[in-house]
Image (cartoon, rainbow, N blue to C red):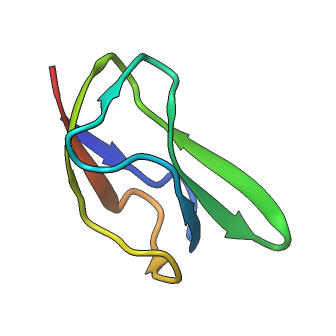
Amino acid sequence: MKIAAEIAASVWQIQARPGDTLAEGDTVLLLESMKMEIPVAAPRAGRLTALLVAEGDQVEEGQTVALLEA
């Protein structure tokens, strides 16, 4: 399952790493836009298989930032 950014922003802080087991709603990373922090959460429980961005990267709305396996 793809986890996507909801807005165009910069990746401020990564809070989960590949291999981590996440519950639904756990924060994967934080985006920063206009001095606001926007959490990107796991849409369901699973194992994070890949992060496709790094801290400081710019992302676009709808861009896949991570992959989650059930």
- The residue at the point 82 percent across, 61 percent down is 36
Q: Is residue 44 left or right of residue 30?
A: left
Residue 21: image location, x then y, percent: 29, 26
Residue at image location 23% in from the left, 48% down from the top: 18
Residue placed most toward the observer, 59 or 67: 67
Q: Nearer the viewer, residue 14 or 4?
A: 14
Residue 33, x across and y down, in percent: 73, 70
Quarter of the picture containing the C terminus is top left
Q: Height in image: 67 above or below 45?
A: below
Q: Is residue 16 left or right of residue 39?
A: left
Placement of the N terminus among the 4 image quadrants: top left
Q: Give me the residue at 68% from left, 51% from top.
A: 38
Which residue is located at x 32 percent, y 16 percent? Answer: 45
Q: Using the rendered view, name the quadrant where residue 53 is placed.
A: bottom left
Q: Position of residue 67 (x, y in %)?
A: 21, 45
Q: Farthest residue toward the right? A: 35
Asked if residue 45 lies left or right of residue 56, the reply is left
Q: Quadrant of residue 44?
A: top left
- In the rendering, at what x and y percent does residue 32 appear? 69, 67
Residue 62 vs residue 44, the one in the foreground: 44
Q: In the rendered view, tell whether residue 31 sits above or below residue 39.
A: below
Number of marks drawn:
0
Instruction: Indicate the quadrant where residue 64 lies.
Output: bottom left
